[in-house]
Image (cartoon, helix red, strand yellow):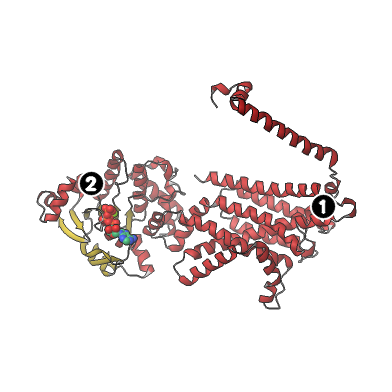
Amino acid sequence: MLIAENVHKWYGKFQVLRGVSLTVSPGEVVVIMGPSGSGKSTFIRTFNALEDYQQGRIIIDGTELSADLRNIDTIRQEVGMVFQQFNLFPHLTVLQNVTLAPTYVRKWSKAKAEEVALQLLERVGILEQAQKFPGQLSGGQQQRVAIARALAMQPKIMLFDEPTSALDPEMVREVLDVMRSLAESGMTMIVVTHEVGFAREVADRIILMDEGLLVESASPIEFFQHPKEERTRKFLSQIL
Amino acid sequence: MNAKSKTPIAWLQRNLFNTWYNSLWTIVCFALLSWIAYGVGNWAFNKAQWEVVTSNLPLFFVGRYPADQVWRLWLVLVIVVGTIATGILNRKRRFLFILIPVCVLSILWLIGGGFFLTTVGTNLWNGLLLTLLAASISIVLAFPIGILLALGRQSSLPILRGFCTIYVELVRGLPLIGILFMAQVMLPLVLPSQIQLDRVVRAIAGLVLFNAAYLAENVRGGLQSIPRGQVEAAKALGLNTSLSLLLIVLPQALRTSIPAIVGQFISLFKDTSLLSLFALVELTGITRSILAQPEYLGRYAEVYLFIGLIYWVFCYTMSQVSRKLERKSI
Ligand SMILES: Nc1ncnc2c1ncn2[C@@H]1O[C@H](COP(=O)(O)OP(=O)(O)OP(=O)(O)O)[C@@H](O)[C@H]1O
Ligand SMILES: [Mg+2]
């Protein structure tokens, strides 16, 4: 479903990604952990071309990412993304936020887009808020709208960049619950998070990144109980 | 207000006479205000001779526009009010894209004539009519040009960005009167000689060139206030650059810059008075010719007060509309 091979990226002289490779198969849920500044966000943002990279290859669902704009736009339609800061469109209602991309990019009729949108909003539990503006919702509700908005494009992969880090503790669960049920429904997901409970329970595989390198890749049980790398042990001792 | 201020006397005591020096201030200010009000009122009702205004009303409004053709202007007024009303009442705004250009064209046809109507030369478009025409056409043209300039300044193409930056900085460093002068004198020199631009058109060109630069800066301010995450979210959903600009960035940027943009429209409206220096007889120009009528020599105060009121009514309306628009966007 997703293959990243030996991805290198520099910001000027500073090297953020130093040759990271990752293969994700359909339906797999991969959690990426790692200390701040290790390049997690940069890495997953290369998958939908929000960041460019100087070396390596990324292939998504059989299509290789290239600098060609049309290629980028097609790939972005297949890759949904949820941001730490929600990034909902404040001038549009919740419903319009969700129907926007399907109507203008997928060219669905208004009726079809709204039908799908309402189903998704029900699935994330905010059907009653459909006519409100994002500013009138709590952080947890906004993030659930953001998930529905990404799902409305019917992507093949969903990327989550610390989706719960900007939330008050009591709202973290409602968002994680939505993500858990999404994982159960068979969605391919790549999630950057510090939520150990979620990683343990939902992830098929956990990856540790540090200083632009992929340090360890293991199943949750191995990752938390028998980490192979010294670096992983040190990281776990800091967060557990 | 809290419970204490229920009765008027208590309110007066609390807000105007709560200390001895505030009482003193209240009395001094009250005396000063009464004195001014008496002076103005006395002048307006006893000394001023408003005949210069009342007997010249048609001149103020339409100037020398042929009296037997004035029905056309009434029709224009009906069209304008009708369009605005449908715009406000109708939820579906999409059809306005067709309605507005049709209106503009029919208005210009009605005023200027040709095609079955008697032609009325632009030298006969005077007074408030010309002020409103010049201002509204300039606003309608300068606004999109300003947006394009602002977007150009953000562009990743160095030539486009450089051109827009130089244009904006150049124009903002010149006085409007100079630009109007250049538009009158230099445009005909630059353009091929077959093209004869009307005086009014040249004046409008000057106003547009000048105001577009200022509007570009206002819009740029709005563009910069949009967080980067908005564009990233739009991209991540597969929206291409123009869609994300049209659907996400511009609506938000324009909303935040409404006060500045309308402020610029208001200046533009008042700046049309400078056209009177180029033999265009708009509201200020017609005032000067009315003041030259032998029977009303020296009635400056009445006449300038009157046109001041007219300018104020339109500017105040614009600023009220702007406040409505701001409030509508949560
Ligand atoms: N635009 C940029 N220019 C220069 N350096 C950058 C830029 N963006 C990120 N970096 C650097 O790249 C490194 C990796 O950043 P990244 O955001 O990917 O880290 P992260 O693992 O997501 O960290 P966090 O957990 O804090 O989100 C950091 O050291 C950061 O300072
Ligand atoms: Mg990050």
- The residue type indicated by label 1 comes to Pro
Cα–Cα span, label 1 and label 2: 77 Å
**Circle 1 sits in a helix, a strand or a loop, which is it?**
helix
Residue on which disc 1 sits: B58
Tell me the quarter of the image containing the N terminus of chain B: top right
B245 or B26: nearer the viewer:
B26
Q: What percent of the width, then of the height, locates residue B59?
A: 82, 54
Residue at the location (71% across, 55% down)? B132
Quadrant in which residue B206 is drawn: bottom right
Quadrant in which residue A108 is drawn: bottom left
In the rendered view, does A70 fall on the left or right side of B220?
Answer: left
Residue on which disc 2 sits: A195
Asked whether the viewer can see residue A214, the reply is yes
Q: What percent of the width, then of the height, locates residue B13?
A: 61, 23
B92 or B258: nearer the viewer:
B258
- The residue type indicated by label 2 comes to Glu
Image quarter where ligand 2 lies: bottom left
